[in-house]
Image (spheres, grey):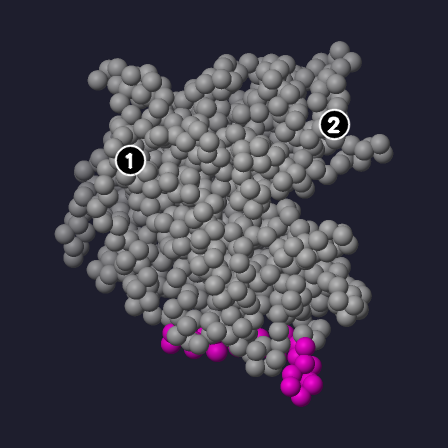
Amino acid sequence: MNNEFRKSLPGTALDYFDTREAVDAIQPGAYAKLPYTSRVLAEQLVRRCDPALLTDALKQLIERKRDLDFPWYPARVVCHDILGQTALVDLAGLRDAIAEKGGDPAKVNPVVPTQLIVDHSLAVEAPGFDPEAFEKNRAIEDRRNEDRFHFIDWTKTAFKNVDVIPAGNGIMHQINLEKMSPVIQARDGVAYPDTCVGTDSHTPHVDALGVIAIGVGGLEAETVMLGHPSMMRLPDIVGVELVGKRQPGITATDIVLALTEFLRQQRVVGAYLEFFGEGAASLTIGDRATISNMTPEYGATAAMFYIDEQTTDYLKLTGREPEQVELVENYAKTTGLWADDLTGAEYERVLKFDLSSVDRTLAGPSNPHRRLPTSALHERGIAVDLDKALAEEKEGKMPDGAVIIAAITSCTNTSNPRNVVAAGLLAKKANELGLIRKPWVKSSFAPGSKVARLYLEEAGLLPELEKLGFGIVAYACTTCNGMSGALDPKIQQEIIDRDLYSTAVLSGNRNFDGRIHPYAKQAFLASPPLVVAYAIAGTVRFDIEKDVLGTDANGNPVTLKDIWPSDDEIDAIVKEHVKPEQFNQVYIPMFDLGQVEEAKSPLYDWRPQSTYIRRPPYWEGALAAERTLKGMRPLAVLPDNITTDHLSPSNAIMMNSAAGEYLHKMGLPEEDFNSYATHRGDHLTAQRATLANPKLFNEMCRDENGEVIQGSLARLEPEGTQMRMWEVIEAYMNRKQPLIIVAGADYGQGSSRDWAAKGVRLAGVEAIVAEGFERIHRTNLVGMGVLPLQFCEGETRHTYSIDGTETYDVQGDIAPGATLTLVIHRVSGESVEVPVICRLDTAAEVETYRAGGVLQRFAKEFLEAEAVA
């Protein structure tokens, strides 16, 4: 702690660290030029960094150098129940490993305050047109997840610094935005900016409040939990100036889908974005949160907004204490974090985006950054052959392009009252004109907070949504997380029998192939009111801007413009019916956690027959063996844009899958197979999900015409036999064959799931060579002891005619950013030496890799410290 910069915060009994003085002492006037992100990172260095290292660390920020590591100490860790539970399973396994080596397992605890919210495990089995949907879905969730919830309940009694918000209360990001983040922390007499890491890629949701919050994998979260700083280098900080004002009738969803396309095109992968300008100032926190939430969809790490009047107004609206609101404004203005004090901030790159250019927009199919203006549905080949679809409907069949799922879901949109109210108003107008939901549409409404129910009820809009089939089915992630539940068996059978092109429309943030539902061949992202409109249309062959949705009582045609609410109508409802007391009514009892009884033992009593929670194997078997990086065979040769959904899907488990067959053998009934995501605490189930996405294209597997076959397939070498992916993995595991994966650009984009790295490591993968990596997944690979390698600029798998028959060695001294040699041994006897870049980016990552992974490194350091003590 650098007490020379510790001062009294005016008007309070708190101290703060004067970062401006510390920075300007090195270079006068430098602080005024720093971006918001650099100011926050500098503050925690002044407060936490070793005094002997402080000057050099601050120079990194001032001079914008990226050649040295510096520590980042997040104030909190937030987790959802899938990765959070998995991280705590890892810590429970770590306790066992420590105990077996003679250490004290009770000393293994999160050092940083950790909040776990159960929000990822509910499936929409009962749809929104079932008046008892909420109760039915919660009962099914509790039954299916009894093993998981038993473990989670144990963690809050066994671990220190862990708070648990149980199922049925909302989505972690929305709760973080509406309640958990104080924006400015006040601990031990010191005020400082709130920061956090979260085990979900959409953790930047709360960046809308000016809080640096980034998504990390469970393995990186474990590092922070256990008291290690997250070592980083100065990120690319890109200014995004928002100009203009949105057009009437345009939602924040439309804006963020247009921004996502724009920012992907601008190549902001890994960057910290800072939104500013008149356009940014005009956006509410709800609008800003919709934009920040989609950070991983445009590939960035963070999406920051400055602290301003919108921030303090939102804190008041959401029921924060007046003293806390005053502290936020006082601290921000004192330390230069208030928007007015950032006019001199300088960026190495500034992008400009005009809000007035945004039209009504969808995204898809299959990619969040694939913007689809509703005005272009016909020319893009979506809204075509409507006559055929209508003819099929008249014959009693589902139409081509049938919308089988229409879901108002995800914190992306339901934390924005304007979006939710817009859906309610559209439903009201549709009901008044006699429009109805098509019978094959499984509709649902799953807000991320219980507050949504309160203001919709008060405004009289919830009954309108319920009438159209959008009753509240849960307060959880649901469809956005691939938990859309089973279809009506008759509808499912018709889709199968006719090989029908069926689709989903949701107000979520992800629509990757195979994610939303196994029988939804493609999915589209849309604003909540558009979701309701598509439930009425019933097919994506419908031109939503022009075609007739139905007729009123007088036989007059009704189109979208007839039921779309005006901005004035939306704003009037929000102003009148969204109130601070609603947030207090929800959150005060939720966070009254009371006194928790301490667990009888620091060691968990593992249940041998559980398919949800099993002692992890990371200190034994193949994972304890040395990685030779020699003689590796390709498990897969993959194209560009491989997502973590390809590497470890999260959707429902089917009987004909490797995981389904395993669960069946374990005696689990098919209706309780649940999702891949919920089984990630049991490695025997979860590893069977490795590369199990049916939409995968492994370029090693081809038909007789040489075309790549779609499916979870691999080719066993040297036999050359094409088989199901899991069968090939099993064969290689039995042979103790080291493996490699070869891939294209943007490898590992999407969710921050650690099993995308755990699965391949358990399969025996020692290295992955790709054209580029998404940040979170690359970090997870390091955390599992898998070596990420990158082709040199301009080179790809095609450059070297890789077909998967080869074996591979890696040569050279492993160091951050080092050029290593990938030796390709062909079946012809030829060997090719390929220069590749070691993507261990920091010295700390090299240390973690050498130890075999995050957990192995911690166990080693813990036992060494115990021995010294």
Give, as a three-letter code, the residue at label 1.
Ala
Residue that mark 1 sits on: 158
User: In which image quadrant can residue 582 be found?
Assistant: bottom left
SS at circle 2: strand
Give, as a three-letter code, the residue at label 2.
Gln
Q: Position of residue 319 (x, y in %)?
A: 29, 63
Residues shaded magenta: 550-577
In the image, taking residue 276 as reference, residue 803 lies left or right, namely: right
Is 480 placed above or below 25 here?
below
Is 369 placed above or below 771 here?
below
Residue farthest left in this picture:
13
Is 804 placed above or below 249 here?
above
For the point 80% across and 36% down, which residue is it? 707
Residue farthest right in this picture:
705
Residue that mark 2 sits on: 722
**Residue 561 on the magenta segment:** yes
Bin the neighbour count of mark 1 within 10 Å (Cα to Cα): few under 14, some 14-19, many 20 and up: many
For the point 75% across and 23% down, which residue is it? 721
